[in-house]
Amino acid sequence: MAQIRIENVRKDFGTFNAVKSSTFTIEDGEFFMLLGPSGCGKTTTLRMMAGLELPSSGQIYIDGEEVGQKPASQRDIAFVFQMFALYPHLNVGKNISYPLISQGMPKAQVKKKVNEIAEILGITDILKRPVGGLSGGDRQRVALGRAIVRDPKAFFMDEPLGALDAEFREHMSEELRALHDRMNATTVYVTHDQLEAMQMGDKIVVMNHGSVEQFGVPQDIYDWPATKFVAEFIGSPPMNFLNFHGMVGNGETQVSFGDTCFDIPAQLDGRNGDLTFGVRPEHVRLDDTASYRGVVSATEYLGTTQIVTVDTANGAVKARVSSADTVRVGERTGLQFDARTITLFDAGTGRALRSQANQGVLAHG
Amino acid sequence: MAEVNLTGISKNYGDDVALADVTMTVPDGSFVVLLGPTGAGKTTTLRMVSGLDTPDAGEIKIGGRDMAGLTPAQRDVAMVFQQYSLYPHLTVRQNLEFPLKSPVLRTPLDEIKRKVGEVAEVLQISHKLDNKATALSGGEMQRVSIGRALVRNPSVYLMDEPLSSLDAKLRSDLRIELKNIQANSGATLLYVTHDQIEAMTMATHVGVLDHGRLVQFGTPREIYENPVSVYAASRLGQPRINVLPADVFAGAPATAKTIGLRPEHIVQGDGADSLVQRVEHLGDQTRLHLIYKDHALITVTDAHTTLKGGDIVKIRPQNPYYFDAAGARVG
């Protein structure tokens, strides 16, 4: 298995710049997510790692070897597309053994290898069956088997669960992750689904408009987003933004708007102008004694919790509170924010201002 | 707006039972969501009410009037399907105006203009009103098709997974909007989905369907907090309720075959040992995948837990649900 390093990789299609200078490292054995909306460059990035596209500039290293301009066949990786691409006229066993036979592996060894893989995937009993009659889940396992059987240096997957319904998707994502934990194979996985990325990934790269917005472990990215885009793209509901015009100085631990003073982590980037105060819904508390106030415009029951939307002078704020609390649409309420979790953003550039709380995460983001 | 009554509705397609003796009242001014996996009978129920399909047995009333033999047009219902169907040669505005311009309705022109403007605003398509319907993205087309139902004032709105093709942000905006429109207008709405978030956040009542049978009908809170069966309990809640053999914990009633544990039914730090298999950081919460007496279960813990794979954590049940061999709630 392998470490993969991307250095200043850029891709242009004619005059269209699909990927701007990207740099990040995927460690050996990691389950690594490329996350972003459609058109952000995540699939292009994956295809460049795989050798299906050549970068316009920059380097790609697999285990220290520069492979940027090498074709896919010389990179020893396995690409799993939408998982249903099987040979329809071959049975399950032959679909899985195909890559080995075409490599010229002796028959006895092929058989042993296929049985081993079938065991891992739990499909031993269907090896002789034609792929035509298989359930969606089994077809996916076969497609995976065909990728795994070669013992490649890394697996690349492009939205492999995209076409499945929610329940089955959850099941397969757990299965994929468990498989990864057994084999410890470096896996690069493209998705636009933030929950899938959080759930499965050891690390996440968030991309937007061809640029890497942030790179790190899921919890760090969630807690300390580097940009407003990341803060909004990750989390459901997303981070709340309260926009205001004001000033914050180096070392300050308070910021004020709407006649209210809010505690914040000690700031390291003094700034004056249009700023955004970012707070996650679970760090908002409804408190009648609080001086910052708004009107409840919606409540959404979610079982143990509910999402309460409060309209304020600085925009709508969503709070995740216990569903045991009685909250009525139309009533006025005060809001408290957990000071330790606040991120301030420059509203113009969308970038987070550094504070003592987020500087560690942003330093290598 | 009107109440909708279904009494003893059954429908078979060949040997397949699509609906079996469904009796349900959609109260006037309610937002009823039919919830269940593919094949549960949700869409069939909707088609029965709309008149697109006729039941083998049973009676449907809208506003107290028997619907037997009436066409969809005669029933005064407005429908939104999963697959949008717009007039491709017309603009967005013309598509939205179309139902109001029906000779039967005779809506005054300024009234049409006002209605269309209002609905376009709510659905965030005001800026596209003069575009051709074919020049829209899929999400925009779906919003227009919802809008075409909303401009009318029918006895009941019938919607079949109208939000499923939209992206996450828009879906969450429209969930709130649809609920607001329904609550403010007092409209009766029958809505089909397999998305539990939609069911919990929008519905005044949820009807849980299982293989053509209505197994529970109540408020989202009733169904979440007081499910009648292991099936109903599994419809709502993320992560899904854990179902284990009843005897893995002490204290189960004699008739119980399984124990149902939602994350909030699992106390951590007290009780018997379980092994942490995997820790999933979702941001606002962290999911623990545990092994307890060889059974896998998932619970939720603090977002910044220091637990990691291989750690031992003690757990015990607190106010769990018990189910008998048939899956019905006991104890």
Image (cartoon, helix red, strand yellow):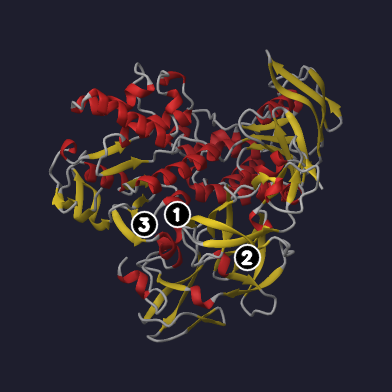
Q: Residue at x 42, y 19 (%)?
A: A129
- Return the mark for residue A21: none
CB-based contact (under 8 Å), mark 3 and mark 2: no
The x and y percentages for residue B72 are 71, 23
Around disc 1, counting alpha carbons within 10 Å, would you say few (fewer than 14), some (14 to 19), or many (20 or more)? Answer: many
Around disc 2, counting alpha carbons within 10 Å, would you say few (fewer than 14), some (14 to 19), or many (20 or more)? Answer: many
Report whether residue A273 is seen.
yes
As shown in the figure, which amino acid type bears the numbered disc 3?
A: Lys
N-terminal of the pair, mark 3 or mark 2, is 3
Element at label 3: strand
Judge from the rendering whether residue B176 lies leftward or rightward of residue B32; answer left or right: left
Residue topped by disc 1: A198
Both marks 1 and 3 on one chain: yes
CB-based contact (under 8 Å), mark 1 and mark 3: no
Residue topped by disc 2: A310
Using the image, determine if residue A107 lies above or below residue B274. above
Looking at the picture, tell me which residue is in the foreground, A183 or A265: A183
Element at label 2: strand
* Chain designation of label 3: A
User: Residue farthest to the right?
Assistant: B64
The x and y percentages for residue B58 are 82, 22
N-terminal of the pair, mark 1 or mark 3, is 1
Q: CA–CA distance between discs 1 and 3?
A: 9 Å
Using the image, determine if residue B12 lies above or below residue A45. above
Select label 2 or label 1 by which is in front.
1
As shown in the figure, which amino acid type bears the numbered disc 1?
A: Met
- Return the mark for residue A203: 3
